[in-house]
Image: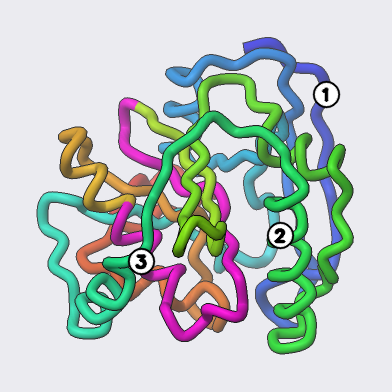
């Protein structure tokens, strides 16, 4: 691993109201998939070459969440989401920027800014999108979902020795009745089983944050406080 810079970012918490948050950042010039796998298991996440993890002094609400693949059993609503999207085609590609993807990303965030008060209004440029999602230090998969050859959802996934890690996902709000977010996680679990990997990593979970609540619906799962040394439980 070759480190370019490190710093602490302090800002208003994106998950819980009336709280401040701190993130520790490590910007890397080079890092292998094996090195990142070790860091991810110990609470780090990444966008592009930016690695980060919580560094809040008085709050430990952010916890890493991973699904235990071999024991996963879909509930009734998850079975419904799978059946609803049998007509959706998944194509796994090498990440690259297109205007179609950028338009879909901006449309999704513009919708969420009004319906969930997200601060991001979806005005990301081609360069900003590339830095976050397509310029990666090791091989990353781009999961594109099509309905009648039209892109309706997209996710980024790291295929690591410890499991599959869901980096980010967005979808066309015109198809929000399809539960595409749930369907994407189910597809990752299914693919993880086919690759004989143990876990699906869903990033950080915050118990009282509505936008992250869906992660706890995939049972069984384990949690890990990135700011402690207690390990997964």
Q: Is residue 206 left or right of residue 119?
A: left
Please tell me how crowded label 2 is: few (under 14), some (14-19), or many (20+) other residues with Cα within 10 Å.
Answer: many
Depth order, front residue of 171/162: 171
Depth order, front residue of 2/126: 126
Q: Which mark is residue 218?
A: none
* Disc 3: which residue: 183
Q: Distance between the Cα atoms at labels 2 and 1? A: 28 Å
Image quadrant of residue 180? bottom left
Callout count: 3
Q: Distance between the Cα atoms at labels 2 and 3? A: 18 Å
The residue positioned 75% from the left and 69% from the top of the image is 107
Task: Please tell me whether residue 138 is drawn above or below residue 79 in the rendered image.
Answer: above
* Marks 3,1: beta carbons within 8 A: no
- Image coordinates for residue 93, horizontal then vertical, percent: 49, 34
Which part of the image, by quadrant, shows the C terminus?
Answer: bottom left
* Disc 1: which residue: 5
Magenta residues, as a range? 161-187
- Image coordinates for residue 34, horizontal then vertical, percent: 43, 18
Image quadrant of residue 153? bottom right
């Amino acid at each position: 691993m070759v480190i370019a810079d490190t710093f602490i970012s302090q800002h208003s918490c994106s998950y819980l109201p009336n709280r401040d948050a701190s993130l520790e950042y490590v910007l890397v010039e080079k890092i292998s998939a094996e090195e990142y796998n070790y860091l991810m298991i110990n609470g780090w996440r990444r966008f592009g070459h930016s690695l980060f993890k919580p560094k809040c002094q008085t709050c430990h609400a952010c916890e890493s969440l991973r699904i235990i693949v071999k024991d996963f059993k879909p509930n009734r609503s998850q079975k419904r989401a799978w059946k609803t999207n049998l007509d959706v085609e998944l194509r796994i590609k090498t990440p690259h920027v297109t205007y179609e993807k950028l338009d879909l990303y901006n449309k999704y965030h513009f919708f969420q800014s009004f319906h969930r008060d997200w601060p991001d209004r979806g005005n990301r440029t081609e360069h900003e999108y590339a830095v976050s999602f397509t310029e990666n230090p090791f091989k990353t998969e781009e999961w594109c979902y099509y309905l009648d050859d039209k892109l309706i959802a997209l996710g980024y996934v790291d295929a690591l020795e410890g499991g599959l890690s869901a980096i980010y996902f967005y979808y066309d709000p015109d198809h929000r009745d399809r539960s595409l977010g749930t369907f994407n996680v189910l597809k990752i679990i299914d693919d993880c089983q086919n690759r004989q990997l143990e876990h699906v990593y869903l990033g950080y979970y915050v118990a009282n944050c509505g936008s992250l609540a869906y992660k706890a619906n995939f049972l069984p799962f384990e949690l890990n406080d990135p700011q402690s040394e207690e390990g997964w439980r």
